[in-house]
Image (cartoon, rainbow, N blue to C red):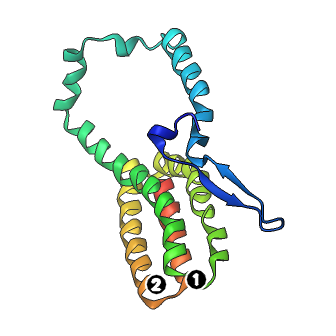
Amino acid sequence: GVFGIVLGDSQTKTDPATGATSEVFAQNGAFFWVPLILLAAICAYFFMNNLHVSQAPPKEQARVMKRKHAWIMSYLYIGTFGSFIGYSASFPLLIKTQFPENLALVFWAPLGPILGSLVRPLGGWLSDTFGGACVTFWTFVAMIGAALGVLYFLEAGSFAGFLIMFLLLFVTTGLG
């Protein structure tokens, strides 16, 4: 309750077996990580000094902003990894809101990020074998098709189709 003034009052928890109530300050749970975060920040400040590239003056670092390929790579990275992060957040929520009749289906939610993470090395190998531009192009084509498939199966109310298309989205973001 130390932060009660700023973060709000406690919640009341009732034990269903005994009916006993107690105060719980669930909003303070995240403060458990503060000492560890501070320790990591202090260690990073004092011991991560081997990055000589970052010691270049800002004017010299800003030259990359004029390079077309740097911008293209940034957009491609946002399109793949940014999509991966967004899908990881929205996938369980979509399952919960669009298929509420069986909340056990949320069990499938971690499968997408796991698959996307596992196929990342395969994407590198494919790019080395067939060329990065070719793999990236077909990855984005497959991502568009899978996103349209997700929309179709959401409208149709088919969890199996929705799941397969979403897993394909995760796989393609991992490959990309």
Helix, strand or loop status at disc 2: helix
Residue 23: x percent and y percent?
66, 50
**Circle 2/circle 1 CB separation < 8 Å:** yes
Q: Residues within 10 Å of mark 1 (few under 14, many from 20)?
A: few
Q: Earlier in the sequence, mark 2 or mark 1?
A: 2
Q: Residue at x 46, y 84 (%)?
A: 153
Q: Nearer the viewer, residue 100 or 156?
A: 100
Residue 152: x percent and y percent?
40, 84
Q: Residue at x 63, y 34 (%)?
A: 32
Residue 170: x percent and y percent?
51, 61
Helix, strand or loop status at disc 1: helix
Q: Residues within 10 Å of mark 2 (few under 14, many from 20)?
A: some
Tell me the kind of residue under disc 2.
Answer: Phe
Q: Of all residues shown, which one is farthest toward the front?
A: 20
Give the labeled residue for mark 2.
153
Residue 176 visible in the current orientation: no
Residue 134 visible in the current orientation: yes
Task: Residue 72: give its label.
Answer: none
Choose top left, top right, bottom left or bottom right for residue 74: top left
Q: Residue at x 40, y 48 (%)?
A: 132
Task: Residue 160: give its label.
Answer: 1
Q: Nearer the viewer, residue 60 or 91?
A: 91
Residue 34: x percent and y percent?
56, 29
Whether residue 5 is situated above or below residue 102 in the rendered picture: above
Q: Residue at x 58, y 49 (%)?
A: 10
Q: Is residue 114 left or right of residue 132?
A: right
Tell me the kind of residue under disc 1.
Answer: Ala
Whether residue 68 is situated above or below residue 59 in the rendered picture: below
Q: Nearer the viewer, residue 4 or 141?
A: 4
